[in-house]
Amino acid sequence: MTPERRARIEPSQTKMLKILVVDDDASIRELLSHQLRHQGRRVIVASDGRMAVELFRRERPDITILDLNMPGLDGIAVLKHIRAIDPAATVMIFTGSGTEAAEAQARELGVTEFLCKGDWPNFQS
């Protein structure tokens, strides 16, 4: 991760980092939520794309961790909605089945990181 990207996701000394975790797999949501809370982060979860857009609009998280493959509104569609709400939002893709084409599309839409499940994002200060 570049220093510029790390600076965007590291919390300030006075603010608790708020993270929106979006995944249709309950075990992944629980695993990420548990780990992030253990690191002292405030975590909001969404089990589908529509809920993610609603929570993003209402909560304005510091970081959104977004799965690509979800029924209904998929990760790319959610990312487009997020960009319409906040073009500068920090969004990380965390997926188990990302293709090069999906990664290219996500990067064109300005994702901060594109991680495959099995990689673990580090939110330590």
Image: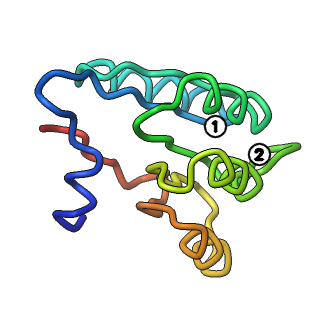
In this rendering, the count of numbered labels is 2
Q: Which mark is residue 95?
A: none
Tell me the SS state at disc 2. loop
Residue sitting at x 70%, y 28% = 47
* Residue 56 found in image quarter: top right
Residue sitting at x 38%, y 20% = 34
Dot 1 corresponds to which residue? 23
Tell me the SS state at disc 1. loop
- Mark 1 or mark 2: which comes first in sequence? 1
Can you give x and y, in whole percent of width and height, for residue 95 in the image?
A: 57, 54
Residue sitting at x 59%, y 79% = 104
Question: Disc 1 marks which amino acid?
Answer: Asp
Classify the position of the C terminus by image quarter.
top left
Q: Nearer the viewer, residue 43 or 70?
A: 43
Residues at marks 1 and 2 touching, judged by CB atoms closer than 8 Å: yes
Question: Disc 2 marks which amino acid?
Answer: Met
Dot 2 corresponds to which residue? 70
Going by the image, does 66 lie left or right of 8?
right
Can you give x and y, in whole percent of width and height, for residue 86 in the image?
A: 57, 48
> Could you give the CA–CA distance between mark 1 and mark 2, rounded to whole angstroms?
7 Å
Q: Callout 1: few (<14), some (14-19), or many (20+) C-alpha neighbours within 10 Å?
A: many
Going by the image, does 83 lie left or right of 123?
right
Can you give x and y, in whole percent of width and height, for residue 21 in the image?
A: 53, 33
Please identify the residue farthest to the right as the structure is shown: 72
Residue sitting at x 83%, y 46% = 73
Going by the image, does 119 lie left or right of 92?
left
In this view, 124 is above or below 101: above
In this view, 28 is above or below 75: above
